[in-house]
Image: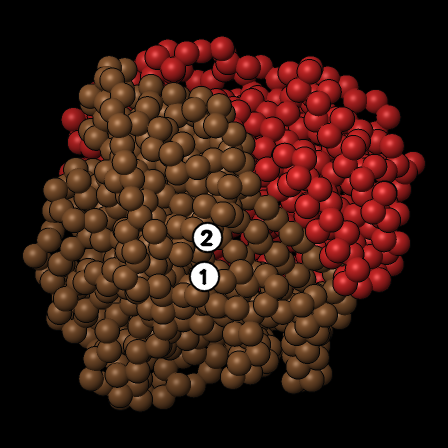
Chain colours: A red, B brown
Amino acid sequence: MAQRKAELQQLIEDLLAEARRQGATAAEAAVSSNAGLTLTVRLGETETIEHTRDNGLGVTVYFGHRKGSASTSDLSPQAIRETVEAACNFARYTSEDPCSGLADAALMATEIPDLDLYHPWHQGVDEAIELALRCEDAARDFDPRIFNSEGASLNSNDGLHVYGNSHGFIGGYPSSRHSLSCAVLGKQDGSMQRDYWYTLCRQSERLESPEQVGRRAAERTVARLNARQLPTQQAPVLFQADVAVGLLRSFIGAIRGAALYRKASFLLDHLGRAVFPAFVNIHEEPHLPMGLASAAYDNEGVATRSREFVRQGVLESYVLDSYAARKLGMQTTGNAGGVRNLRISSGELDREGLLRKMDRGLLVTELMGQGVNMVTGDYSRGAAGFWVEAGEIAYPVEEITIAGNMRDMMMGLLEVGSDLETRSSVQTGSWLIDRMMIAGE
Amino acid sequence: MSDLIQIAQQTILSPVGLAAQDLDRMLGELTGKGVDAADLYFQSSRLESWVLEDGIIKEGAHNIEQGAGIRVISGEKTGFAYSDELQLPTLQEAARAARAITRSGAEQSVRISGVPISRQLYAAINPLPTLDEVEKVELLRQLDREARNQDPRVKEVIVSLVAAHDVVLVAAIDGTLCADVRPLVRLNVHVIAERGSRREQGSSGGGARESLDYFMQQERGLGYAREAVRQALVNLEAVDAPAGSMPVVLGPGWPGVLLHEAVGHGLEGDFNRKGTSAFSGRIGEQVAAACCTVVDDGTLPGRRGSLTIDDEGTPGQNTVLIENGILKGYMQDKHNASLMKVDTTGNGRRESYAHLPMPRMTNTYMLPGEQDPEEIIGSVDRGLYAVNFGGGQVDITSGRFVFSASEAYLIEKGKVTRPVKGATLIGNGPETMTRVSMVGNDLKLDAGVGVCGKEGQSVPVGVGQPTLKVDELIVGGTEQ
């Protein structure tokens, strides 16, 4: 890896030099090189074995305030030359944009701490197949109603990422990512359902056991059998942690610089205003060891640091890269490339506690479709889950929609569960929301 | 040898010093006992994109993607490896990795030969230089002006233009040697309109397997700008959408995304071979109302979803999926077709050399019926008339699907009245198709913007339908 990293750093340096030779006043480039194994077993047999090997290189050049970009998966010298030329050519035709350019040199990361992101999994194909088989077996043996399978998949990927720009910044680090997933089908009285589960980590030792993943997939599938519809009504809604992640992502989408300067956000001009109830804090921790989104610098080389986006319900910061920051007359928040290990503060109650608190309402465990209008905040999505009576799951439900407006849903947040979803760069427990419209029969 | 094969060899193989004999030799190394099928897929793509925003040309980007994928199949097992380096030793290493799916066997020789393509559905052109940079920039500016001139309430305009040139070469141990040159262009206009504190968006676009002149012809590009503004202004007037089960009339063209979700995915061969689709084992059964005939047609000249050959070298076909409500067939790639002992239907598609092919849709649409669209709307006492949609999604096992209306109106006493806000519609594929009660005589295909995602792979597709009425569908609004 050390040698490969040195090669890629050299490649970036040569490329930046070439851009300057072609007349660029500034340039930045990133290269990534990933290799991995993905395999699937189904019904006890190996189904696919894929050896993956992906390279990607992207360069952006600036001629004053004019910009051009190009990228290539082919890292041969002639492809790289063609790529730099193409980027420089575009910069002749794009417009003068006073906001464009590299991030300020003073903001570049000066130290690059080791965030413990690289834990290669030295396993053979046979060993990997064995794990996937154990996972699928556990799912198929879980319940007689499990009658078919989409299989169990194991994925292991190692990558190296190097970024550099003409301020002289260059940084690179290796990382790894491993996952195991399983999806099975259940049948009862003519109702057929499918569900899945997965585990995802930087270090293979920290994955859930294959049996746990398989059993969880089967348990989720069986629980959905014989789902009913609901009558159209208003009711409280509990978003289970894995689907609540999507709500948190929609919130982040609305405070992204690009959405704000385009006036395409339902949280336009909300800085300093309450957007959640006072118990909510939303915090970003980019240097979390082994974090799924950890990085010491962002996609522009800007040093990342921990930050509160929401404090006591009040929106304290947008999510900005340097371009959006200049458009808005602000300072970049080191979020070029997105947020890194974002977490919403959790309360005391686990999912069962939240069900009791809700008493009667809808537990949502699956959402379908896009259905979030980022300009207006209007929210309307397909849903499946469980009807809850007297604080307990009564029966599974499907083929319903839930609707409301993101702003009302955020302010109507009653509680965030302690049941944290950790398989995502955006982490949250379940969300209990006071009231939404459910459309059904 | 056809011209396409020559073009592909010159574009992909010659620059790296590979010759036809090298392909024969590599395929030979993939054969042996236990190997049922194996193929090599070479690809070289160039893509260019332009973005206008805030009245200025903000982005211009160029992308190169090149590589080869090697697949070996034994029964239901598939071994796959790919490389973005096209040097022979790297390819041989990838071939060994893919070949490891079966351990026994000896090399055999393979002789591939090019079969002439009977009908090319689009010209073998590179669309990127069909307008020069100045002309591309002017096209974007013209659309920006057109959108802003439509109405003073238009506040933001984003115009994006994409042109792609994709050259592929497929060689397989069954003797297949095929190539295709696939142009693809797309233009999109997105606007935000403001009235007081209210902001709404509108979006329109189109594309085809054509040169960039396509957007100049018949004022297509200008039409997208006008249409995006019209939608945004309609949405400024929209009231809350209704919630609950009601009759829904779907407009012609793009609302055909209904068919893509409600039946299309469920009829893909892989799901049906594995028995995981709500339509599995139902060939010959009534799965839709008798007024419904649905086809997947990859043979429409120049269309976004069309394929002269699919990514396994099979010529694009027009496949009847549902005829007068009866399930007729599934969409197949070679692997699933051979396991199900049926013929391939030219639906073997892959996002790129780095992805495995699988059965995918091309252009999926419903054939026209008899009814006048006015008559269909007139038959509804209270319901929804939905004419534009965002995306959709389906759970093929339970049959549940959603699609999100972005422009819709209330129907009250047979008349289209007020516009309502976007809402998600949800139904169950097989059930919804039996509730189609009226089919219009106004078949229209979409403007060429569809992207279909499956197992992480995106491919361009088309949809279409005449105006049609579903007696009962759940509308996910907020007004009870």
Q: CA distance from mark 1 to mark 2?
A: 9 Å
**Residue to which mark 2 is pinned:** B7
**Which is more toward the observer, A370 or B334?**
B334
**Which is more toward the observer, A315 or A121?**
A121
- To the question of a shared chain for discs 1 and 2, the answer is yes
Res. B77 visible in picture: no
**Residue to which mark 1 is pinned:** B124
Res. B161 visible in picture: yes
The percent position of residue A320, horizontal first and vertical second, equals 76, 47
Residue at the image position 37 percent from the left and 28 percent from the top: B26
Horizontal side of residue B344 vs B61, given as left or right: left
The percent position of residue A80, horizontal first and vertical second, equals 68, 39
Horizontal side of residue B277 vs B183, given as left or right: left
Tell me if label 1 and label 2 are in contact, CB under 8 Å: yes
Residue at the image position 43 percent from the left and 78 percent from the top: B409
Outermost right residue: A106
Residue type, mark 1 in image: Ala
**Residue B36, quarter of the rendered image:** top left
On the rendered image, what quadrant is the C terminus of chain B found in?
bottom left
- Badge 2 marks a residue whose secondary structure is helix
Q: Can you tell which of label 1 and label 2 is closer to the viewer?
A: 2
Q: Residues within 10 Å of mark 1 (few under 14, many from 20)?
A: some
